[in-house]
């Protein structure tokens, strides 16, 4: 096929990606947007296979078959609570594909100009970091036993990182000067391996609660890697699509950082949550007041407005369906029910929304933090399900708290707060939470799903 | 590669990044997860490059490496779009009374 025609088709595909992303801005059109974007991808792939430059197709077809055979079952089987792990893995495979593409292009023709060599270097470096970083993020999210989901810090970590990054850049520069020399191939392999090590070292110091930031950032990297690969094979479509993804990842990263009132540098390097005890004096004194499901039922019976505030604990307990069931029962009793979602609740941006959507909660009942906060003082009951830092009043009141300044869902302003919690321990980051000892807070200890079910049972019995 | 082409490509790069910022800023927080997995699938566009590399006139080693790129990029594309579609299918508006 003539190159111009292929390029025209690519232009159409780029439009599909852009239009698809535009449709993603509303839940009503988002699904169509995704399909349009997928259609663009399909057309791009078919046009490329029929391209005149492609002279043999057996490797391509074999690769497409193998990739599809792995991708389809993985996407169909994954549980909604495991979406963060899935996204991390998909990110990683995009990254390693860029690395392989750079390697293949260089291996096919080592007589390349220094500028082209530089693009190969970038695609391998970013691709490698994305791959190994995503793999470690996957391990942390999955909770594999050889990896702690707490920050892993060692002495001189920053120095090691700096040395590795500097040597990758130096090797890259040497490689770019004369890519055709035999020794440059060794430079190439060396910086490829260093990029993998850098990805690992970049993610191990980051704790589980900071994962929304890391996943967003890796998402951005995978786009930039595709972009760099686009320069390698001189393909405009890769550059356009890659930079759209790069920009989207950067925006999400910024939103996540803002929602935690921390800078990106602080998230990436501070090892937040590695200390077991919180710094600063806590404003909390007093006891947690436990309550039975029966007493909770009497309060809910009399309530007129109830707001559910889910956190990562709801995902762990897989409690979303039980939450929705209780919500429906309350609505039948004439209660106004809403769900308040903090931007960093869970392990990736929008994690809670997906789980609640899975449980059939209509999206117009999902309310963002800024929109729910003004109505909380007039709310009868807030039910906090496995959330901790995102509802910690110390973020507002206690300057000594490590999370001071982080915007929170002000559940403590509600008339009564039910907090569902597995035990009396501190939350993930080990930070004191005075919410649990407040006068208007009642604790419902135990597995969130079991607690929800016992509340539902109370309603059914009465 | 010609420096002129390089500059053209950089032009496209910068404009697309700006366009990306404008597009994504409007996505509501509710859709952040599907946005991420959907945009992740778009970054699987590297598949197009991998196909070119796997099909060109080169040694068997180069094409084998490109084959690996095709496999991983395909996983990214197929898995990403499917899982996004699954998620978005769950987002429903509240049903009007009487139509349940």
Image: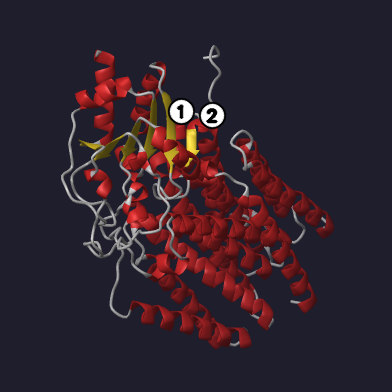
The numbered disc on residue A107 is none
Residue B44 sits in which quadrant?
A: bottom right
Q: Estimate the x, y position of residue A394 in percent, counting from the top left.
A: 32, 54
Q: Position of residue A399 (x, y in %)?
A: 33, 62
Q: Dot 2: few (<14), some (14–19), or many (≥20) neighbours within 10 Å?
A: some
Residue B82 horizontal side relative to residue A352, left or right? right
In the image, taking residue A235 as reference, residue B26 lies left or right, namely left
Indicate which disc residue A360 carries.
1
Which residue is depicted at the point 17% across and 36% down? A290
Q: Is residue A167 above or below residue A103?
A: below
Instruction: Give B34 or A305, whichever is nearer the viewer.
Output: A305
As displayed, is residue A355 above or below residue A152? above
Residue drawn at the location 81% of the way across and 59% of the way down: A3
Question: Which residue is identified by label 2?
Answer: B92
Give the answer, above or below, for where B57 lies relative to A245: below
* SS at circle 2: loop
Label 1 environment density (alpha carbons within 10 Å; few <14, some 14–19, many ≥20): some
Regarding residue A255, the answer to whether it shows in the image is yes
Of residue B19 and residue A169, the one placed in the foreground of this image is B19
Circles 2 and 1, Cβ within 8 Å, touching? The answer is: yes
Q: Residue B8 in the image: state x and y as whole percent.
A: 78, 70
Check the image and report above or below for A457 versus A422.
above
Quarter of the image that includes the C terminus of chain A = top left
The residue sitting at 26% across, 37% down in the picture is A440
């Amino acid at each position: 096929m003539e190159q111009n025609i292929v390029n025209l088709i690519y232009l159409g595909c780029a439009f599909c990606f852009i239009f698809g992303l535009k449709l993603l801005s509303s839940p009503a059109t988002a699904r169509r947007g995704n399909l349009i974007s997928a259609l663009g991808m399909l057309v791009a792939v078919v046009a490329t296979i029929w391209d005149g430059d492609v002279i043999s197709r057996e490797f391509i077809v074999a690769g497409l078959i193998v990739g599809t055979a792995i991708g389809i079952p993985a996407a169909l089987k994954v549980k909604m609570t495991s979406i963060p792990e899935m996204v991390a893995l998909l990110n990683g495979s995009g990254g390693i594909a860029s690395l392989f593409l750079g390697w293949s292009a260089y291996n096919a023709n080592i007589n390349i100009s220094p500028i082209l060599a530089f693009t190969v270097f970038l695609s391998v470096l970013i691709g490698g970091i994305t791959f190994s970083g995503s793999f470690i993020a996957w391990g942390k999210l999955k909770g594999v036993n050889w990896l702690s989901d707490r920050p892993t810090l060692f002495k001189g970590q920053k120095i090691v990182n700096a040395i590795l990054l500097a040597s990758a850049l130096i090797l890259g520069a040497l490689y770019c000067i004369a890519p055709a020399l035999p020794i440059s191939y060794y430079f190439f392999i060396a910086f490829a391996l260093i990029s993998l090590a850098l990805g690992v070292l970049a993610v191990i110091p980051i704790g589980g609660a900071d994962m929304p930031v890391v996943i967003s950032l890796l998402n951005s990297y995978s786009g930039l890697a595709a972009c760099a690969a686009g320069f390698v094979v001189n393909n405009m479509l890769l550059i356009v699509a890659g930079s759209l993804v790069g920009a989207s990842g950067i925006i999400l990263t910024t939103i996540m950082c803002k929602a935690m009132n921390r800078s990106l540098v602080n998230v990436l390097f501070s090892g937040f949550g590695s200390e077991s005890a919180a710094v600063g004096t806590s404003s909390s004194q007093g006891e947690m007041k436990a309550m039975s499901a029966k007493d909770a039922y009497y309060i809910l019976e009399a309530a007129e407005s109830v707001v559910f505030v889910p956190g990562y604990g709801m995902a762990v307990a897989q409690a979303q369906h039980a939450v929705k069931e209780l919500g429906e029962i309350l609505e039948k009793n004439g209660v106004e029910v809403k769900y308040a979602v903090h931007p960093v609740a869970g392990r990736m941006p929008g994690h809670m929304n997906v789980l609640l959507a899975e449980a059939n909660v209509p999206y117009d009942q999902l309310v963002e933090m800024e929109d729910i906060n003004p109505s909380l003082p007039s709310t009868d009951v807030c039910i906090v399900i496995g959330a901790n830092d995102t509802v910690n009043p110390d973020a507002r009141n206690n300057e000594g708290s490590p999370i001071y300044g982080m915007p929170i869902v002000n559940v403590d302003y509600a008339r009564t707060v039910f907090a569902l919690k597995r035990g009396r321990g501190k939350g993930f980051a080990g930070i004191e939470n005075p919410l649990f000892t407040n006068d208007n807070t009642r604790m419902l200890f135990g597995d969130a799903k079991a607690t929800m079910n016992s509340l539902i049972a109370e309603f059914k019995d009465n | 590669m010609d420096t002129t082409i390089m500059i053209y490509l950089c032009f496209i790069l910068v404009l697309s990044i700006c366009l990306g910022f404008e597009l994504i800023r409007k996505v509501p927080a509710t859709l952040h997860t599907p946005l991420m997995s959907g945009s992740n699938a778009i970054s699987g566009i590297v598949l197009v490059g991998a196909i070119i590399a796997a099909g060109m006139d080169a040694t068997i080693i180069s094409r084998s490496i490109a084959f690996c790129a095709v496999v991983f990029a395909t996983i990214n594309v197929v898995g990403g779009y499917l899982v996004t579609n699954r998620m978005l299918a769950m987002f429903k508006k509240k049903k009007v009374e009487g139509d349940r």
